[in-house]
Image (cartoon, rainbow, N blue to C red):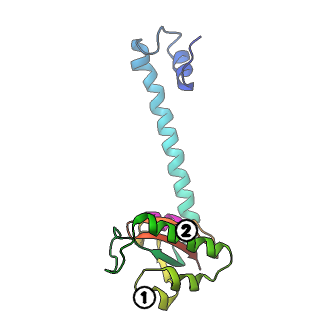
Amino acid sequence: MITRPRIGWLALLLCGGCGSLATTPSWVGGGMAVIGPLEREREEAEAEEERVRMASEPDEIGARHILVMHAGSQAKPEEVSRTKEEARARAAEALRKIREGADFTEMVRQYSDEPGAAERGGDLGMFRREVMVKNFSDAAFGLKVGEVSEVVETAYGFHIIKRTR
């Protein structure tokens, strides 16, 4: 009995009980013809899931966020010198307090390094998916109104996102 991954028995069946799966020409040529359609089918299913998600997703959403930056963050203010690990821990601390009931806007004032964030409570207004970096957009658009994300890492630092609209 041949013990191969699931595709192995399928290939054996399709090549008519040919000898060794690894060396038989029918496996190399004929069996691979099976993998192509299976891979295409998987890709088509993933593409369909993406189309359904995009169709059910609003064009724009509203959100607030806390941005904790580190020395390697893009567009950081000069005074930010913490390490990446320190920034991640600071963001996790802010998220823990929010989960325990702390006011999001107050946490923006205490934790966000984004210039001007404290004055506007971290409000980003309404935005389209393609305006933000992918990690941020994926997290923000994946939230329901009122939900708060986990800590999200981008090139700008660590974000905590609250969807508002």
Kindly report the distance in space between the C-alpha atoms of the residues bearing marks 2 and 1. 22 Å
SS under mark 2: helix
- Vertically, is 164 above or below 85? below
Say what amino acid the circle numbered 2 marks: Ala
Residue 113 picture location, percent across and down: 43, 80
Q: Residue furthest top?
A: 19
Near mark 1 (Cα within 10 A), the count class, few <14, some 14-19 or many ≥20, is few
- Vertically, is 149 above or below 19? below
| Residue depth check, mark 2 versus mark 1: number of the one nearer the observer | 2
Residue 100 picture location, percent across and down: 68, 74
Residue situated in front as seen by the camera: 155 or 13:
155
Q: Is residue 140 magenta?
A: yes
> What residue is shown at x 46% (from left), y 21% (from top)?
31
Q: Which mark is residue 116?
A: 1
| Residue range highlighted in magenta | 134-141
Near mark 2 (Cα within 10 A), the count class, few <14, some 14-19 or many ≥20, is some
Circle 2 residue? 92
Residue situated in front as seen by the camera: 122 or 18:
122
Which quarter of the rendering shows the C terminus? Answer: bottom right
Which quarter of the rendering shows the N terminus? Answer: top right
Residue 76 picture location, percent across and down: 34, 76
> What residue is shown at x 42% (from left), y 11% (from top)?
24
Q: Residue furthest bottom?
A: 119
SS under mark 1: loop
Of callouts 2 and 1, the N-terminal one? 2
Say what amino acid the circle numbered 1 marks: Gly
> What residue is shown at x 56% (from left), y 71% (from top)?
93
Residue 128 picture location, percent across and down: 46, 74
The answer to whether residue 46 is left or right of residue 73 is right
Residue situated in front as seen by the camera: 13 or 151:
151
Res 145 seen here: no
The majority secondary structure of the magenta stretch comes to helix
